[in-house]
Image: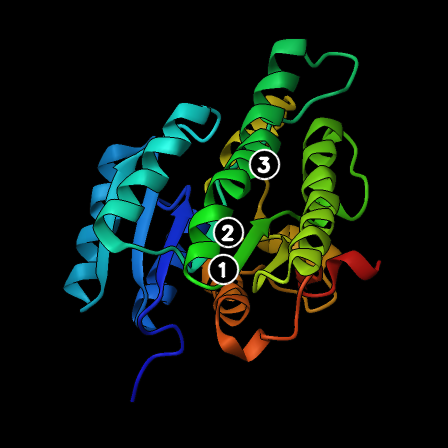
Amino acid sequence: MAGRVAGKVALVTGGASGIGRGCAERLAEEGAVVVITDLQDHKGEETVQAIVAAGGICEYLHHDVTDEAAWVDVVDRIRAKHGRLDILVNNAGIGLGGSVLEMSLADWRRQTAVNLDGVFLGTKHSIPLMRQGGGGSIINMSSVAGLKGAPTLAGYCATKGGVRLFTKAVAMECGNAKDGIRVNSVHPGIIETPIWLTVAPAAGNAPPDLDALSQMAVPLGVKGVPLDIANGVLWLASEESRYVTGAELVIDGGLSVR
């Protein structure tokens, strides 16, 4: 039986660890040829090895998502080797916590460059190749922090809120062009990933106990894992979601309803 994305070519940024790795593994498991990009070369190669060992097809490219020339190179490589791009998961992101009064302009710009500029550049340079293939699915990783505010996360919320509305605008643009490209955002809640090791210390706090935090704040009472997000991304990448564009897929155990 063919996989749910068999024959498709997928690009996952920030694919070396966390949610990105989970998405890459799930897409490969369901038949996609997966290209992962990241700055963590060792972890990227480890992810490729794990996917290949499990029977998938995957390759790794070193890639700074804030660099437009790097985006041109990555898409050109995919065009030359695979001839098409069907799925783009704009997942690469960083979290820098701290009071808005203490955040430096340099940190604000760094976070914006990765979380928002990277999504813009990926979308801009991937759409032409997708159009050549007759369409595709762009999945932009936002956050529950893109739906509501959180103290000491003003910069992060700003970038993830920007991703949310950027997604809707591009979905309308592609819809008007009738190019067969769907564009949606995913909004994870408390997921066990390495980002928690950077957000809290940057805000002057110790990394949180995610189990205790989830019991307190999440209606389902448990934290999520990368596979929870990857399953949603797989659905948006597949033809099962053919009538879904400009939507927000919230995967947070109910955190955002409080």
Q: Name the outermost residue toward the right.
A: 258
Closer to the N terminus: mark 2 or mark 1?
Answer: 2
* Callout 3: SS: helix
Answer yes or no: is residue 106 visible.
yes
What is the spatial separation of the Cα atoms under label 1 and label 3, in whole angstroms?
26 Å
Q: Count residues near mark 2 (Cα–Cα under 10 Å), then give few for <14, some for 14-19, many for 20+.
A: some
Residue 91 is left or right of residue 9, and the answer is right
- Residue at left offset 47%, top offset 58%: 226
Identity, as a three-letter code, of the amino acid under mark 1: Val
Q: Position of residue 247 (x, y in %)?
A: 71, 62
* Callout 1: SS: loop
The residue wearing badge 1 is: 225
Is 81 above or below relative to 182? Answer: above
Answer yes or no: is residue 193 visible.
no
Q: Position of residue 165 (x, y in %)?
A: 75, 45
Closer to the N terminus: mark 1 or mark 3?
Answer: 3
Identity, as a three-letter code, of the amino acid under mark 2: Glu
Q: Count residues near mark 3 (Cα–Cα under 10 Å), then give few for <14, some for 14-19, many for 20+.
A: many
Identity, as a three-letter code, of the amino acid under mark 3: Phe
Q: Position of residue 230 (x, y in %)?
A: 47, 63
Residue 70 is left or right of residue 141, and the answer is left
Residue contact at pointers 2 and 1, CB within 8 angstroms: yes
Residue contact at pointers 2 and 3, CB within 8 angstroms: no
